[in-house]
Image (spheres, rainbow, N blue to C red):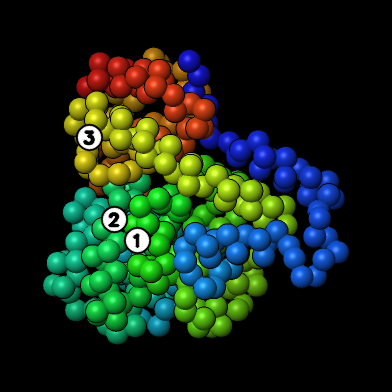
Amino acid sequence: MEFKFKEPHKETRESMAKVASGENPYLNDRNNSFEKNCQKKVKEITGHEYCEITSSGNNSIFIALSAIEGSVIIPDQGGWNGFKQIANYLNKEIITLKTDLGLINTDYLNEMDIPKNSALIFTSFAGYSANQDTKSISKYCKNNGITTIEDASAGIGDEKQELGNGNLSDIIIASTGSPKIINVGSGGFISSNKPEIFENTKLPQKLSKTNEIICSGIDKELDFVKSNLEQTINATNILKKHINNTFHASKRGVNVIIQHDKPKDIIWKVKKELPINHHAFITKCPNYNRLKEKGLVIEVKNLDYSSLKKENLDKIIEVINNQL
């Protein structure tokens, strides 16, 4: 039994190493590059017409929010701290949206007075634990002139086409840092069907450019993205089915959040019993990026795919349930 922290695929590491050593097949080809390959693949996955590869997920957020003229609507939990930090830096008015434990309910949007040209920014999975109803979010926002910005760092490559789908979200952003579904250690992207997003943010785009080494890694990791997400969701579903007191038990996710009044005590005991030598496998709540409820989090998305075997999942279930 072995638990490993997520690493880029072997093919990804090899590709990046070759480019770093100077073996770049596009070095003298003005018409092609790993960046252009990435853009093409991202556009195929999201269904968007335009795409830029960036140096990080936060820089993708910066570009997206720079293009917004009105207010920025941010969920009250289950999002990403960078949403608020970057909106504040850009002097955007922030509207905090009440949620159902991170899940966006359009009824709450309907109760609010939202200025024109505003945008709603959210993650594909609330707290990484529950898939958002992007269809209802999209329908409401399109009917009310609200731009939707989906952080699909954990939802890109969804086989059900509910997450990271350009027909539903106006702007899709993602981090390709570690340990994301596209796992390169750095980089990100932004895609949209709205050319003005890119025309009006040329300076932020220029400042957030990445290099061919990272692009070569993203290019290769994109070949695995659908399988990566499917394996992670399947493993999470198994844990949710067999572990007691989980939030959003019936929802798809890439981690498991377990309700508990003393999560710190449980985490310490679990770490003693599970051979996982990494602090980011088990975390605790309350945490804005997860849920504002007391509990512990099994960060399935941080495990290498080789660790998502039945025997490993069975061991996690046994140890956790014994401590609850």
Lateral position of residue 208 relative to residue 130, left or right: right
Q: Please state which amino acid type lies under the numbered disc 3.
A: Thr
The answer to which of marks 3 and 2 sits earlier in the sequence is 2
Residue 118, image x, y percentages: 33, 78
Eye-nearest disc, 3 or 2: 2
State the count of labels: 3
Residue 129, image x, y percentages: 31, 44
- The residue pinned by badge 2 equals 132
Lateral position of residue 135 relative to residue 230, left or right: left
Q: Distance between the residues labelled 3 and 1?
A: 22 Å
For image coordinates 37% across by 57% down, the residue present is 161
Residue 30 in sight from this viewpoint: yes
Viewer-proximal residue, 123 or 81?
123
Q: Do the residues labelled 2 and 1 touch (CB within 8 Å)?
A: yes
The disc at residue 122 is 1
- The residue pinned by badge 3 equals 246
Q: How far apart are marks 2 and 1 (CA)?
A: 9 Å
Lateral position of residue 305 relative to residue 158, left or right: right
Q: Please state which amino acid type lies under the numbered disc 1.
A: Phe
**In the picture shown, does residue 113 fall above or below 252?**
below
Asked which quadrant contains residue 150, the reply is: bottom left
Residue density around tag 1, few if under 14, some if 14–19, many if 20 or more, within 10 Å: many
